[in-house]
Amino acid sequence: MSEKDLKLEIIKVGKRLYEAGLAVAKSGNLSARIDEENILITATGTFLGQLKEEDIVKVNLTNAKFTGESKPSSELPLHSLVYKNFPAKAVIHCHPPLINGYFAVAKTLKAMSFETKFYLGNIPVIPQETPTVTSPEPVIASLKTNNLVVLKNHGTIAIADKFEDALSITEALEEAVKSAAIARLFDKDILDSLDAALREDLKRNEPAYNMFSREHIQAIVDLVNRDEFIGQKGKELDLTLKLAIRMDERTEVFKFNFEKGRIVKLDFDADAPFVISAPAPVWEQVFLGKLDCFVAVTQGKMKLSGQLGQLSKWYVPFTRLFALFKEVKVK
């Protein structure tokens, strides 16, 4: 197929994605292999539903040099790595709304039809923390097991020998997610047989503990120490300090001894530079996830012994820490 024909094919696929609601505004990108050394890829900031030939850029896979005034998509590194690792001739990266919504709360998809089982199989889900895929290696590894991968909170990437096949599996997954959602509307009890991962997420607060019991606080400590995000940010920001929490109605205090994001010891005294205290009703709202600790302190709902400005340099990991409070259910 000539370069011109490939461009026309890309334009056609972009329009179909837009009409199917799988690509809106300036989201998504497409590419196709010309030969072993060159590909065509949509330019950055383009509408897939309104592509023109000048919106499609020729790029050399070896040196990433491109021709023309338009710059290639910011996802070029991911597309390039696909072509360097697979004989694929087409790549579709789009942001299907139902797929994004479903996998924002679920880890896996229970197939509702034989077609889904047959054509999609087990869909890999890769965590994403940035608008652009900055770590493509896990995506490439997953593409070795499935031609369709979900990028959590981001979208999907599909590879194939031709656009028709990549588009087909993308549409099939969006339809499978739609079927699962409709099934739940018809029968709320279908959760028991549909999606074990989602059911696990919905019940992750079990078991329930007495608020501010030692078992309750220890469960929080265990959850924090298993959390990869706090561990990562704790190392980056050197989260090393002592932070105590106390309920006004009780004398017992719980002190978290942090070392680079990990709670290495749990003590029971207030000998710490930072102590957060509040009455039981306020803590109850915190553990229900209805009240943010930082907001509660600034609004006077909670008291902080220590300088909030010093504590705020660890705002990112502590925001995650306080969010994890609600993951442990209280009676």
Image (spheres, rainbow, N blue to C red):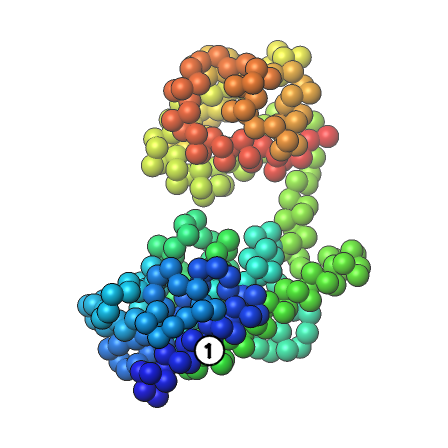
Q: Observer-nearest residue: 178 or 82? A: 178
Tell me which residue sits at (67%, 35%) in the image: 329
Tell me which residue sits at (69%, 63%) in the image: 180
Q: Please state if 232 lies on the left or on the right of 148 as rendered.
A: left
Image position, residue 90 (x, y; %): 40, 77
Position above or below: 35 against 258: below
Q: Please state if 61 lies on the left or on the right of 123 as rendered.
A: left
Is residue 267 visible in this depiction of the protein?
no
Q: Observer-nearest residue: 303 or 5? A: 5
SS of the residue under disc 1: helix
Image position, residue 175 (x, y; %): 63, 69
Mark 1 lies on residue: 12
Tell me which residue sits at (42%, 80%) in the image: 9
Q: Observer-nearest residue: 239 or 71? A: 71
Position above or below: 303 against 32: above
Image position, residue 274 (x, y; %): 46, 16
Tell me which residue sits at (21%, 68%) in the image: 65
- Please rate how many residues cluster around mark 1, counting C-alpha atoms within 10 Å: few if below 14, some from 14 to 19, many from 20: some
Where residue 82 sits, quadrant-wise, is bottom left
Quadrant placement of the C terminus = top right
Position above or below: 138 against 326: below
